[in-house]
Image: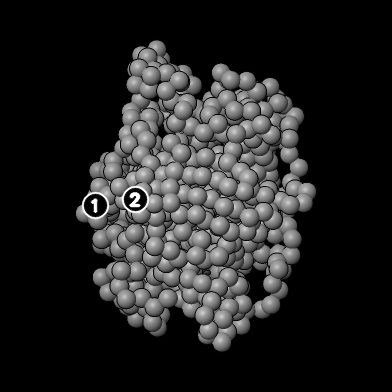
Amino acid sequence: MRNYSMLNRRTFLARSAAIGGAAVFAPLLPAWARSGTQGLMADMPVLSGGDVALTIGHTPFTVGGRTGQAITINGTLPAPLIRLKEGQNARISVTNTLEEDSSIHWHGILLPFQMDGVPGVSFPGIRPGETFVYEFPVRHAGTFWYHSHSGLQEQLGHYGPLIFDPADADPVAYDREHVLVLSDWSFMQPHMMMQKLKHGSGYFNRQKLTLSGLLQEGNPEEKMPLKDRLMWNGMRMDPTDIADITGSTYTYLVNGHGPQENWTGLFRPGERVRLRVINASAMTIFNFRIPGLRMTVVQADGNDVRPVSVDEFQISVAETYDVIVEPQDDRAFTIVAESVDRSGMGRATLAPRMGMAAEVPPLRPRPMLGMDDMGMAGMQNSPMGAMAGMAHGGGTAGMEMENMNMRDTSLAPPGMKVGVGVDMIAMDPQDAAGKPGLGLENAGHKVLVYTDLVALQPNPDQRLPSRSMQIHLTGNMERFMWSFDGRKFSEIVEPIRFARDERVRVTLVNDTMMQHPIHLHGHFFEVVNGHPGNHPRKHTVNVMPGSKITFDLTADNPGDWAFHCHLLFHMHAGMFNVVTVRPLEGGAV
């Protein structure tokens, strides 16, 4: 990979001419997101107080020497930082100047459902030229974010960070803090992107296995025996299908800066620096690391956890992680946000002074799908698994699949709709709470897994669940169809019903070979990870291919709530439903 700190003169002049210099670029960025920021200091201009005003509109956006049209808030991408305090009442006026309806959803926030901001579920949306006032009490502290829930506007830049400070002393000690908003930007219009995916789900995959790989020549990771290639073809699947949309069209951003712009946050050696990392991308799961700096995870999805030291973590779409780093040396460090398929990366820098840069590591070899990702990890020691002889993620599957039919509809659970929209059923999905992110199995250093997360405070509801349920994540990759239990939201789908204050254990079973970050609005749930009483509370959980994840939910926020995959194009293709929480007696909210 090219070292972006070594830009040549021609590239520099071309980029400067394209963006008109920093004076043109800077106004499109809020103060907290500008390169060279000292961090979120007391005098940093942010939106706070009892009344906040936001305006949604169109603004040109320049990155990498090209300019496109973005949907912005108050004229910036990312949007302004809103910083409020636990215990105060938020009053946020949002004016829509677009020629289409818009909205803002307050991601991960506990609030009345009428203020949640999902058109058609919790409110009608904000029509062109109109203003909607969101009002809600700030009930908890943490790092969150906000974004559009209308159409595909999120892909065009409609997102921003949100911090709720604790009413009492913060349990996390730090000297300086930076917000890092990770996102993906494309100059292709999102509706065209959706059209490309519907016509051919592998349109953006430029890392497919090649003829040289078929002949066992070329790159080592491409070597795969002919019989295994034929097996994959027979299943109409591709072991390189890791991400639907890739670096072939995406520029990966850190605080609105592409790799060439190299966002830089400053520090003093010896400080404890808090990084509030938010994955606000539309479709990209990132592997996040800072070579040479160990990170201590202190918060997940806005909820404090016992500190855990790691070298890398995978952050799925819509998740947030707060980490502490303690750089001791007077030198720069590269922040790496590598796309999960390794087709590109977001790059930024932590440094004592502007102008400093560190080496940018090359992209690592791409991951490959294997037995685990087909939902057959538990069969490896079984007679059928021994017959299959499959290895996970190693690039050579070694598969004999004649007697395995993942499309066998007899494997479908009762109630699942089996048809053209379901092209795979996981035969033996395993719990993935203890698994590192896809492609990070052999990273060679400590990678965060969900079982590392332990809530700092005991879970507020210690009751055992009164019932259990399974929800299957289903799809047809070839036709780019996505659903829950085989039913797209565009069909007549019954909502998922909970009684108010009911305690339910929910298991998400991924019957596909794609990852799915599943988000429930208006609630925190507890990921069941072997720490009963202190399970981590999250609002979004990443479900790895062919695996399952379990969480316990206390349905204590009445109303109608969106429940969906947070991969934007998966949600719009049908992986969406409504969770309805009603009083036990069945009355009104």
Q: Name the residue that disc number 2 marks.
A: 128
* Residue that lies at the very extreme toward the bottom in this rendered image: 585
> Residue 70 lies in what quarter of the image?
top left
Is residue 357 at all visible to an observer of this figure? yes
In percent of width and height, residue 407 lies at 31, 72
Looking at the image, is mark 2 or mark 1 nearer the viewer?
2
Q: Residue at x 36, y 44 (%)?
A: 97
Q: Residue at x 39, y 58 (%)?
A: 125
Q: How many marks?
A: 2
The three-letter amino acid code for the residue at tag 2 is Pro
Sequence-wise, the earlier of marks 2 and 1 is: 2
Label 1 packing within 10 angstroms: few (<14), some (14-19), many (20+): few
User: Compared with residue 415, is residue 509 higher up or lower down, i.e. above or below?
Assistant: above
Label 2 packing within 10 angstroms: few (<14), some (14-19), many (20+): some
The foreground one among 92 and 332 is 92
User: Compared with residue 231, is residue 54 higher up or lower down, i.e. above or below?
Assistant: above
The three-letter amino acid code for the residue at tag 1 is Gln
Label 1: state its secondary structure. helix
In percent of width and height, residue 233 lies at 26, 58
Q: Is residue 3 left or right of residue 164?
A: left
Is residue 219 at all visible to an observer of this figure? no
Label 2: state its secondary structure. loop
Q: Name the residue that disc number 1 marks.
A: 195
Q: In which quadrant is the N terminus drawn?
A: top left
